[in-house]
Image (spheres, rainbow, N blue to C red):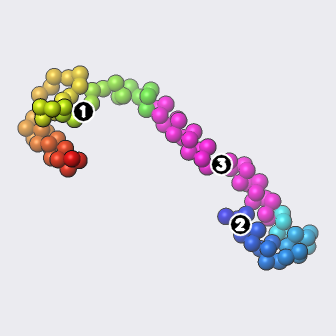
Amino acid sequence: TLQRVADQAIQLHGAMGVCADTPLTSIWAAARVLRLADGPDAVHWRKAGQLELLRQRENPLARLPYYSPPRGDGAPVFRRTADPVSAESAAAVEAFERVMG
């Protein structure tokens, strides 16, 4: 980051790095201010996750039926629907479940 580079430059210059004769201290301070203005990354990721979860909960497609794996008899079970499953789809589901083990 810019702040780390400026800090290393200050260290290399010793006492000269912190005096007013070089722009290093103002560069370091400006980089620090930009880091503060940007904010912590963990907070951004958390807020983005919260917003995505909220968006998914409010999605009208969330209430549609979905596939759930078989529970005992080996036949695929679709919740809230009585639609027949084609042989091709059943074979694909079986292959998937074998792979997923």
Is 98 placed above or below 20 here? above
Residue 27's disc number: none
Amino acid beneath label 1: Ser
Say which residue label 2 marks. Answer: 4
Q: Label 2's element?
A: helix
In magenta stretch: residue 50: yes
Q: CA distance from mark 1 to mark 2?
A: 51 Å
Say which residue label 3 marks. Answer: 40
- Of the 4 image quadrants, the one containing the N terminus is bottom right
Tell me which segment is drawn in magenta. 27-55
The image position of residue 78, as x and y in percent, is 20, 28
The residue lying toward the viewer, choosing from 67 and 31, is: 67
In the rendered structure, the answer to whether residue 84 lies left or right of residue 29 reads left
Res 85 seen here: no
Q: Are marks 3 and 2 in contact (CB under 8 Å)?
A: no
Q: Label 1's element?
A: strand
The image position of residue 14, as x and y in percent, is 85, 76
